[in-house]
Image (spheres, rainbow, N blue to C red):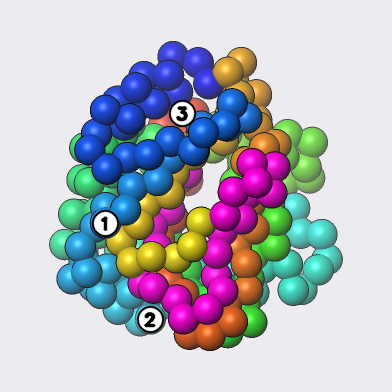
Amino acid sequence: MGELGESLAARVIARTGVQRVPTAKAEVFQARRFIPAPLCEALIALIEADRRPSTIADDIGDPAFRTSETCDLPDTHPAVRELEQRFADLSGLDPAHGEPIQGQRYAVGQEFKAHTDYFDPLGADYQRFCALSGQRTWTFMIYLNDVAAGGATRFRHLSKMFQPEMGKLLFWNNRLEDGAVNPATLHHGMKVRRGVKYVITKWYREDLWRG
């Protein structure tokens, strides 16, 4: 995790409402009611207006691996600016290291099978995605709505499952103490059984974000 991971962990755990998952395998945190309902609703509207089929790195040839829809959120929109500021205030991470915020929409039956957010150092697409900005470090994900059934995020190696809840933030360090990637962060966006799930994802990189 290194100096950055340690300082971020110490910073966030001191904040009211932030909880750390009790495991030594990974740094994983949650904060309920991180953003209010009106902001959630504004972000959902942006996702609905510009969604497209989601894609994956290192495609393994399984068309059902990731079946959600994705939207790149405009950084000029007031709701997106507010969200960026909330992330910066909580984490202390340099916004210049952050990828643009994305939104995802999961309809009934859609999922994102077990995957990691870091890019596989041995994967075919590693150089393509990491040459300019380096590896992904931290992931920040927000559930924008309650879901009637299904849609949980399961961390199999941590024996932990998070249920969608409007405004709840889930965030984790994708690395180990020595800076190597952490396989224990493998997680599964499970199938929605009833309703629709909306989430926000924000990833940070080792170096300045350059696309």
Query: Which residue type carries mark 2?
Result: Glu
The magenta stretch is 139-161
Left or right placement of residue 203 versus residue 31 in this view: right
Q: Position of residue 81 (x, y in %)?
A: 20, 54
Crowding around mark 1 (Cα neighbors within 10 Å: few <14, some 14 to 19, many 20+) is some
* Real-space CA distance between mark 3 and mark 2, rounded to the nearest whole angstrom: 31 Å
For the residue pair 15 and 39, the one nearer the viewer reads as 15
Task: From the image, state whether disc 1 or disc 2 is nearer to you.
Answer: 1
**Is 146 in the magenta?**
yes
* Residue 33 disc label: 1
Q: Position of residue 105 (x, y in %)?
A: 48, 74
* Residue 207 disc label: 3
In the rendered view, would you say 145 is above or below 77?
A: below
- According to the picture, the residue beneath numbered tag 2 turns out to be 48
**Mark 2: secondary structure:** helix
Task: From the image, state whether disc 1 or disc 3 is nearer to you.
Answer: 1
Q: N-terminal of the two: label 1 or label 3?
A: 1
Left or right placement of residue 132 versus residue 31 in this view: right
* Residue 68 disc label: none
Q: N-terminal of the two: label 1 or label 2?
A: 1
For the residue pair 49 and 27, the one nearer the viewer reads as 27
**Is 136 in the magenta?**
no
